[in-house]
Image: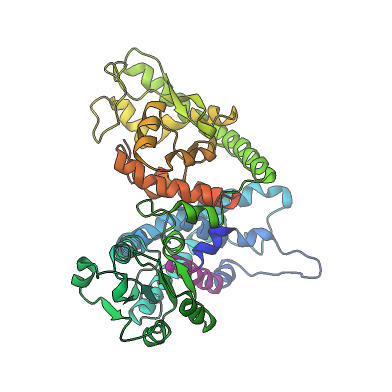
Amino acid sequence: MRFLKLSLTTTGSVLFLLDLSLVALVWPATLWIGGPVTVSIAAAQIDIRMFAYPLAVLLVMYAMGLYRRDAILEPRKTATRIPLVVGMGGVLAILASLGAGWLGPLTFGWYGGRDQAMLFGLATVSLTTAALTARVIFFFLLHMRVLHRRLLVVGAGQRAYDLLRMLRKEGNNLHYEIAFLQEPAKGEIDPRLAAEPGVRIIMQSECGLLEAARLVRADEIVVAPDDRRGMDLQRLLDCKKAGYPVVQYLSFIESEIQRIDIKRLEVGWLVFSEGFTFSAIDRFLKRAFDLVVSSLVLALTAPLLLCGMIAIRSEGPGPVFYRQERVTLDNRVFWIMKLRTMRVDAEAGGAVWAATKDNRITKVGNFLRRARIDELPQLVNILKGEMSFVGPRPERPVFVAELAEQIPLYNERHMVKAGLTGWAQVNYPYGASVEDARSKLGYDLYYVKNFSILFDLVILLQTLREVLWPSGVR
């Protein structure tokens, strides 16, 4: 549930609410055009499948990442994808309605009168129009500065500059109006921050904290000085009593960027903040989730797995499957299973990181990796309880030992089982270096800290985007 709380103030959530509102407006008209609707409330004859199209379309739009920052920042590319995504949602709606046939015959009011093809066409046109209109309204609101977020940052040093840089690159809100309040006794202003065009820096000798918050009409106060010793907490309390939310730097980064800032991570903050708790019911639900989802996916993808095995065998001699030691929950080592995508002698000289355009990958292996088919045998590891469907990427013991020496708190990612997909995998491109591992650890710790079954479902949905429109595969 904490993940939901952290996501409610994003521009993506605003866009989703616009989509939901417009879909709710156009869908009844679409049903009416598709055929006269007669509903008997007294007889409770409202077919729940009448909601299949709008729900399926919104679900697929979310799964395909149309509410993510990168998609919002590329409106032209997103506009070309919307009809395809809406069509995918329509297909899902048809499959769902057919699968729900046990509810009774399809009522002519909702799906009859005109055939399914007619309704599919009407739904695609109307819901695509609704989605495009929502984005026009959204960018109009941005232009009118309605969705701008005003922040007052206490501090103007290195940490404040890092905050500005991360918000511009990764912030869940597209536009921030940020003012920095600096106390001369707390050090010098970061020269990079001072050189930024349009940055407003207020000296505390000229304006008090509460006065500064009122001056910039702050929506939130972020406490981010390089040195917090000697801070006047009473002034922060006065701001809070006056209605200005006050939040620490690390907590703000966690909620706004949905990862943990490894560079300036403080163990004390991890100790006293919420998260890192796993009840018995949590573990039971996660295991049940793993068994159900992995069994279903394995059954649906068995033909793809068989074709991949045949393709590897036809390319040349060598084993079809590839087994390798990986690390999972509590640093336990297990043997992961994959379809072999590299030459048999790929690691004759020892373990090495994968690289872009790795010449050890075979032609068939390259296709299997891009289609993610090589990962399917890991479903067996999930059924055996060695992995989970969602969790941090399993690394090799030799790399784990190396990374744990260089990256603080790296082993904390092993508080949960390694996963076939995960928060880092859907937010960060494939990494093959210590710096990549450091960046991905921020996402892994965020996942471990905010774990819930609902969060697993969100990650599972977003994995569909990575399968169909991969951001990076090696």
Residue at 32% across, 18% down: 315
Residue 436 vertical placement versus 118 (above, below):
above
Assign the C terminus to one quadrant of the image.
top left
Q: Residue 181: x and y, percent?
A: 33, 77
User: Is 292 situated left or right of 297 in this image?
Assistant: right
Going by the picture, which residue comes out furthest to the top?
Answer: 317
Whether residue 461 can be seen here: no
Q: Nearer the viewer, residue 12 or 233?
A: 233
**Residue 192, image x, y percentages:** 20, 66
Between 222 and 232, the one lying in front of the other is: 232
Q: Is the magenta region chiefly helix, strand or loop? A: helix
**Residue 159: horizontal and vertical position, in percent?**
32, 63
| Nearer to the camera, 10 or 183 | 183
Identify the magenta region. Answer: 9-25
| Residue 148 drawn in magenta | no
Q: Nearer the viewer, residue 338 or 428?
A: 428
The colour scheme used here is rainbow
Residue 14 among magenta residues: yes
Q: Is residue 57 above or below residue 463?
A: below
Q: Image point 59% across, 30% down: which residue?
A: 385
